Image: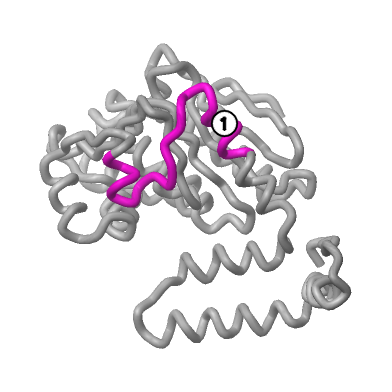
Amino acid sequence: MSYKTLLTTLEEGIFTITINRPDKMNALNRDVIEELSQAISEVYERSDIRSAIITGAGEKAFVAGADISEFTSLDAAGGEALARKNQQLVFDRIEQAPKPIVAAVNGYALGGGCELALACHFILASENAKFGQPEVNLGLLPGYGGTQRLTQAVGKGRAMQLIMTGEMVSAQEAQQYGIANAVVPAAELLNAVKKILLVIHTKAPLAIARVIACINNFDHTQKGYDFEIRQFGECFGTADKVEGTNAFLEKRKPVFTGK
């Protein structure tokens, strides 16, 4: 599929989605949201895609926020409808995808850009990356899951401070706080993500999908544990479980089929 605002490539089962508006710091506008939704559908539907990377074009920005010009005509009902629609189209579908989707943050990840990265299953950042939720400077707050996902990543107190001040943090601080898993030189960023994904590709796809589902359903109460128990049991009905256990006992590498 061809896109106007995205560049996509598929190599070794890894679908790289690059938001391609470098002159606008890769800001999220209506077209980008709609095309991201289509690209995420490819991840869900195509069997030749095992995992995905989301990144930004150029050296300055991953995504430096939403296109604020699209906000000016909205009232309260319109703002709520926009947030609900875009979360359902893109952010929630990334988080719930049954295949790993990783953010390669190569510059500014601000506002909706930070929320896009947080919706991914994990984040690697370049040394020049910066993260922030500056919506309060516009009289707004994060509307694409930022209050929820940032709190899960960094804890209540730090999320309160970061969102209420609107301050940016460096890649190194983001790693320290638990936003980014690792910080690498910009030239090595995509290869670093691909190296991790290729390891994940050697694992059972149905098990990976259930890992994502269980972690997304994390709950301190028994509800979360019960969900994990059910997913664990379902794995026992898969051909990959038979192959994995047999390979272990036979001291060989498993060949998983995703069945």
Disc 1: which residue: 190
Asked if residue 213 lies left or right of residue 246, the reply is left
Q: Residue at x 52, y 22 (%)?
A: 187
Residue 211 vertical placement versus 24 (above, below): below
Residue 25 lies within the magenta run: no
* Residue 59 x, y percent position in the rendering: 43, 17
Q: Which element type, helix, strand or loop, lies under badge 1?
A: helix
Residue 180 lies within the magenta run: yes
* Residue 73 x, y percent position in the rendering: 25, 30
Q: How many marks?
A: 1
As rendered, which of 87 and 163 lies closer to the eye?
Answer: 163
Q: Quadrant of the N terminus?
A: top right
Residue 98 appears in view: yes
Q: Quadrant of residue 39?
A: top right
Q: Residue at x 45, y 44 (%)?
A: 123
- Identity of the amino acid at label 1? Leu
Residue span colored magenta: 173-194
